[in-house]
Amino acid sequence: MARSGTWTGIALSGVLCLSLAGCSSTGGKRAEDAREAAAQGRAAVNTPRWTFAMITHSGDGDTFWDIVQSGAKQAAVKDNINFLYSHDDEAQQQAQLVDAAIDKRVDGIIVTLAKPDAMKAALARARKAGIPVITVNSGSAESKAFGALTHIGQDETIAGEAVGEELNRRGKKKAVCVLHEQGNVGHEQRCDGVAKTFTGTVSDLYVTGTSMPDVQSAIEAKLQADPSIDAVVTLGAPFADTAVKARQGAGSKAEIDTFDLNAKVAAGLADDSLGFAVDQQPYLQGYQAVDLLWLYKYNGDVLGGGRPVLTGPQIITEDQADELAEYTERGTR
């Protein structure tokens, strides 16, 4: 895990250096100028005002994607980019949004591949139109084959394996992995990763992620039916609080752990209602995607060398909760 974090830091440093026209004795001054420009809502570069479109598989109200957008918008200001965002949790609708971006003749596309088969044709049309594509968050295995410049995110299998190892360290014996979006390959990879390294037993629980009452009742019923469950793993920050309520309703003592981070998760870690969280740094995914597209348009640069640029996983516990609270409140972690 340490090697992944180190590579991410190196990759980000490289992006920042290139974005500011080179690291040198004046690099610190350039970086400060860029931060000041972004804070004032003005570009730090004089390149053309290209238009980049980001199309994700997000449903309504998912705070994770608010953080992704926060990073993307920050980079867009710095890079003089007109940034467009759209989303749909139905794969065919998401593909149609990609087609709409192509019809608008955007200068670059950022897209998620939660359900890659449904997106393949749309990305082929983007390639045919000469529009560079970067994939983020999900679909790292398909990204290169679909013609994307690079993929930015965490390896979901590795992230799941990290969760299994953390559960072992905590002495857990029986876990439930809660999948809130059926057919999402990244979610399946996470739960498969947990099962691979967890020495106890783990079962998958499919829930209707668009209805929090249904999610709560499903988890509560599972915990009531099997009091020996001592860990519940949710795959998104908004579902962690719901799982806590389900635990209370079931009278269970199971630990609630989650993928992803937001202000509520940070608070839950601090007050010990949650065990740990897996952070994949969504702000960084959005920021790097815009910045790397800008670098490609400006200088033909590509990061990753044909492999994903990793932004996670990082296990977050109560020890880091207070430190991260400030960042989650401002919407960047």
Image (cartoon, rainbow, N blue to C red):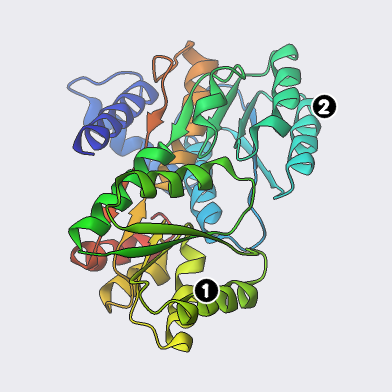
Asked which quadrant contains residue 226, the reply is bottom left
Residue at 22% across / 62% down in the picture?
320
Q: Which mark is nearer the camera, 1 or 2?
A: 1
Find disc 2 in the rendering and name its residue: 103
Q: Which residue is mark 1?
A: 219
At label 2, the amino acid type is Asp
Check the image and report above or below for 333 versus 151. below
Q: Residues within 10 Å of mark 1 (few under 14, many from 20)?
A: many
Q: Nearer the viewer, residue 239 or 88?
A: 239
Label 1 and label 2: CA atoms lie apart by 43 Å
**Circle 2: element type:** helix
- Residue 170 position, x and y percent, is 20, 63
Q: Nearer the viewer, residue 89 or 52?
A: 89
Judged left or right of residue 109, residue 310 is left
Can residue 53 be seen at all in this image of the molecule?
no
Classify residue 64 as left or right of residue 88. left
Q: Position of residue 122 (x, y in %)?
A: 75, 26
Amino acid of disc 1: Ile
Q: Which mark is on residue 115? A: none
> Measuring 41% from the left and 20% from the top, which residue is drawn there?
307
Left or right of residue 107: residue 76: left
Quarter of the image holding residue 93? top right
What residue is drawn where x is 58% and y is 33%? Answer: 81
Residue 240 vs residue 172, the one in the foreground: 172
Q: Quadrant of the N terminus?
A: top left
In the rendered image of this protein, does residue 229 appear above or below residue 21? Answer: below
221 shown above or below 80: below
| Relative image position of residue 28 (x, y in whole percent) | 22, 32
Q: Secondary structure at mark 1?
A: helix
